[in-house]
Amino acid sequence: MIEINHLSKKYRRGGWALHDVTLTLNEGMVGLLGPNGAGKSSLMRILATLVPPTAGEATINGIPLRKAEDIRGMIGYLPQQFQVYPQLTGAEYLDYVGEMKGMNDRKRRKAEIDRLLEEVNLQDKAGKRVRTYSGGMKRRLGIAQALLGSPQVLIVDEPTAGLDPEERVRFRNLLTRFSLGRIVLLSTHIVADIESNCRQIAVLDRGRVRMSGDLAELQDYGRGKVWEGIVSEEQFARLDPMSVVSTRRSEQGLLCRVIGEAPPSGSDGVLVRPTLEDGYLALLRTSQREGARGYE
Ligand SMILES: Nc1ncnc2c1ncn2[C@@H]1O[C@H](COP(=O)(O)OP(=O)(O)OP(=O)(O)O)[C@@H](O)[C@H]1O
């Protein structure tokens, strides 16, 4: 279990990245969702003991963050900007990471590395130097190094960025399998990444927790706020662009899906069932409106 209590972070050259974050994260896949600059990476870097919080505290499986060595022995971490020595091959790099993680048995280390290379679909590239890898391949190598040693807690920062759709699906399935009996904390701003497999979701926006709960709870934020209706091109031009979720051309005009308190003006729109993405967008709109009114 990860328990985060009143955690705040202020960077020396910057403002507050996290404000009073309190969260309890349980076993299974946990999705940390939020727009750019929400504070997701800051929270993950703090949990990975790479940067200290300004205030507050957290424990991972009962161990406080100040015991950094113990925490690092328990977690796997994939940072958003993952750097590898370009002159090493993928297999050499993983071997090095395995040694650093204290996997001293050579044979077992090699067996696990071979299995992981297959899981991330890099087995054919294992002997090639990392500098010849594409961005997506480097990302997959990063995923493999985080999984090495089967850590109890896996923290992955936007792991699917740069992966093609097929690899994305493969990776989601890999994480879901891995999360059995473990905590996998995954940050993303893409709702589809957490749609099917997360037991718990926390939404951050401008450093604050805006919701924490399950998929149904997030979806519910869109209840009574998602409308579909047909509008003309002129009416469309007058709609608040922030409220329009999607548009499709039809014979009668533009079929618009909007988030708001009323149907798209000029249409006889109807309320529709929100998707998870609608729920997320509705929550963000409320949070941003409150921010603009100075309620925080
Ligand atoms: N080292 C730093 N020094 C100063 N400010 C920083 C630093 N790192 C992050 N910030 C600021 O802290 C805030 C939160 O950034 P953070 O990277 O944690 O958000 P994020 O949710 O991961 O965003 P993204 O999805 O864009 O990666 C932003 O305003 C960012 O500019």
Image: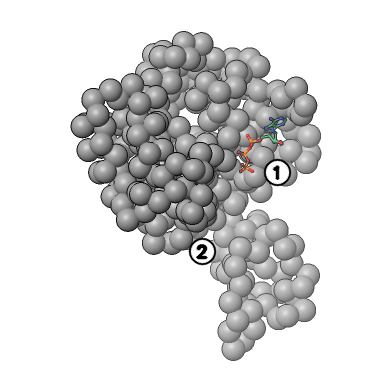
The residue identified by callout 2 is: 272
Residue 230 location, x and y as percent? 62, 77
| Classed neighbour count for the residue bearing mark 2: other residues with Cα under 10 Å, few (<14), some (14–19), many (≥20) | some
Residue visible at 50% across and 24% down in the picture? 47
Q: Evaluate if marks 2 and 1 touch, with contact meaning CB atoms under 8 Å apart.
A: no
Observer-side mark, 2 or 1, equals 1
Q: Amino acid at mark 1?
A: Gln
**From mark 2 to mark 1, how far is it between C-alphas?**
23 Å
Image coordinates of residue 108 in percent, x first then y, are: 21, 31
Front one among 88 and 290 = 88
Name the quadrant where ligand 1 sits: top right
- The residue labelled by disc 1 is 288
Nearest the viewer among 10 and 93 is: 93
Q: Is residue 229 above or below residue 261?
A: below
Q: Is residue 267 left or right of residue 215?
A: right
Task: In the rendered view, tell whether residue 6 sits above or below residue 224.
Answer: above
Q: Residue at x 59, y 56 (%)?
A: 225
Residue 163 visible in the snapshot: yes
